[in-house]
Image: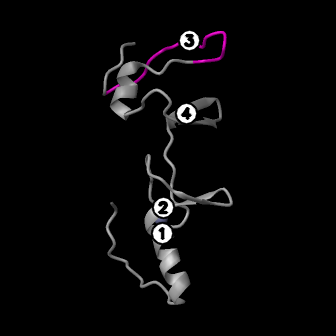
Amino acid sequence: MAYNKKNKGVVRCIDKMGRVVIPKEIRKDLGMDIGSPVEITVFGNQVQIRKYVEYCIICGKPQAGAEMLKIHDKKICDKCSGLIGKYTVTGELPPVDEDEEDE
Ligand SMILES: [Zn+2]
């Protein structure tokens, strides 16, 4: 079956090294380049391969390609690390900002 945006079903064979090629059109559509990390998950008898995106453990926002602060194998975004630094120094509690928009 040919790849198209409506039906992304494509049949590919696993090579002798256990590799599967993700079609160029799909990689292009998803912004996946050579060296892009992918996440492989198994659900029963299905294998899902998706573009790997890291999330800040504090705010939960995706951080595609952004530098993150790593503390004990946990990563936090620039914004959260800035807030932690600010409120650690001052001893204040951060304001509750419920109307904050996703960036
Ligand atoms: Zn964050």
Q: Which mark is residue 48?
A: 4
Identity, as a three-letter code, of the amino acid under mark 1:
Cys
Q: How far apart in space, not on screen, are marks 3 and 4 (Cα)?
A: 15 Å
Q: Are marks 1 and 2 in contact (CB under 8 Å)?
A: yes
Q: Are marks 2 and 3 in contact (CB under 8 Å)?
A: no
From the viewer's perspective, is residue 50 above or below residue 9?
A: below
Identity, as a three-letter code, of the amino acid under mark 4:
Gln
Q: Taking 59 as reference, is 18 left or right? A: right
Q: Are marks 2 and 4 in contact (CB under 8 Å)?
A: no
Q: Which residue is mark 3?
A: 13
From the viewer's perspective, is residue 61 above or below residue 13?
A: below
Q: What secondary structure is the magenta-colored segment mainly? A: loop
Q: Is mark 2 within 8 Å of ligand 1?
A: yes
**Few, some or many C-alpha atoms within 10 Å of disc 4 (few <14, some 14-19, many ≥20)?**
few
Q: Is mark 1 within 8 Å of ligand 1?
A: yes
Q: Which mark is residue 80?
A: 1
Pointer 1 or 4: first along the chain: 4
Q: Residue at x 44, y 51 (%)?
A: 66
Q: Which mark is residue 33?
A: none
Pointer 2 or 3: first along the chain: 3
